[in-house]
Amino acid sequence: MGRHGQASSSPAEDDRRPIPHGHRAAPTENKRGARIKPELVRLRGTTAHSPAAAVNLRLAGAPGDAFATTDLNIESLRVPITGISLENSSAPNSIHAQAYECTAGDCLVDLASPTFERNLLQTSAVTVPVGTYDRVVFSFCRGNETTHVVYLTASVSLNGTTYYTRPDGSLATGAPAQPAAIRFSGCANGSMMPYPVAVTDNGVVQQVPDEDGEVPTPVGEASLRLYFATDDIAWAAMGATHSLWFSGACALPSEQAEAGTPYVCVGYPVVGSFLGTTTIPTVERYSMDIASSVTLFTDGPAIYGGYLRRHLRSAADVEREHLSATGALYSIAVNTDGSLNLQGYVGATGPEWAFPAFRRESHSGTYRDHYQVSRSYSATRLP
């Protein structure tokens, strides 16, 4: 898995963490349950792109100047979404329900579509069996496939020069941008639901307590809106690979990247799941001085999901200690003082990263890295 930025040696990173193909239980034939219609909805995110913000990063171990940024102008991000399923993370092979299956065409969905706050998929309601579901899993392969290709079309400013994507994952100065074909290993990726969806014989309900602590009444049919944003989902670099180049996320061969060819990489989307409501959630985004950003999908005090991503904006971002492993928040808990205990993927030695007292405002605090070492950070809430 990804490690702390100054000690990383593994090529994998959490936001690309695949769920192995072929380990899914077949959907149950039990017809008891409730009807759910999944909807994939893009949110506008927070701040607009500002190519002039791309910066000169002098990276340890890199010859001369190196450049990197997560502030890309993404024209298109086409992902093959072949299916969406719901599962219980503690029993994924027994509590599992198919909510959507692509049956025609190449199944490519443009996650950078200018269509905001509307369903990007051609979905209909399906019967989901009785059970409690706390994870949404996106599938990207068909049949016996073990890899899939994502197509990223984007431009980016590096040290004052505008570069455009090329099919091999490199960047060049000639317009227009061409789709970069980035091949991912694995066939699925999941997002946790802090508030599980419970399906009973009486209907379906998301277990979000109201102000009095009461859970809403189940309904017979509801939409499950899967919200996402593309802030910081991709990054570009030139003259550096440490904590930036990863097999799969980046298409350009490492030898060419290390030789100085500019390149682009991308991660998986993470969704916040809202059942039976058309309320547009708030996207709370926090930049941190550890080359990372935290994004939360919220509705008032309730947090429906989020993620940590790479956030490169200043020359100090990669020079100092920083996080390289990124991805979905696997655990979101509210402390007694109102702060949040946020954790990434939990492995044998503990979470890959944790913020035990993260506040929903600009603040300073400590986080723990993969080695469970506490380090300081400062977070700024973005407008």
Image (tube, helix red, strand yellow):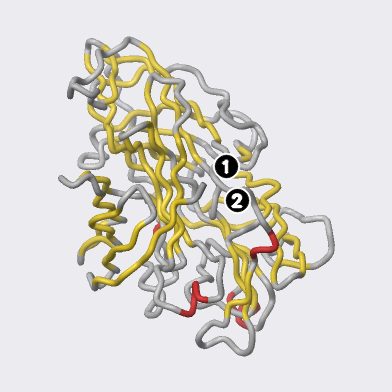
Crowding at dot 1, Cα within 10 Å, few <14 / some 14-19 / many 20+, comes out as many
Which residue position is annotated with label 2? 150
Regarding residue 121, the answer to whether it shows in the image is: no
**Residue 235, x across and y down, in percent:** 58, 62
Instruction: Say which of 33 and 157 sits in front.
Output: 157
Q: Which residue is mark 1?
A: 80
Location of residue 209 with respect to 8 vertically, above or below? above
Residue sitting at 25 percent across and 36 percent down?
88
Left or right: 239, with 282 as reference point: right
Q: Amino acid at mark 1?
A: Pro
Q: Secondary structure at mark 2?
A: strand
Please state which of residues 84 and 68 is positioned toward the viewer in this rendering: 68
- Disc 1 versus disc 2: distance between alpha carbons? 7 Å
Residue for point 25% across, 41% down: 89
Residue 307 location in percent, x, y?
Answer: 40, 50
Residue 56 screen position, x and y as percent: 63, 76
Q: Is residue 149 visible to us here?
A: yes
Give residue 256's mark: none
Nearest to N terminus: mark 1 or mark 2:
1
Name the foreground residue: 89 vs 381: 381
Label 2 crowd bin: few (<14), some (14–19), many (20+), radius 10 Å: many
Q: Quadrant of the N terminus?
A: bottom left
Q: Are marks 1 and 2 in contact (CB under 8 Å)?
A: yes
| Amino acid carrying mark 2 in the image | Val
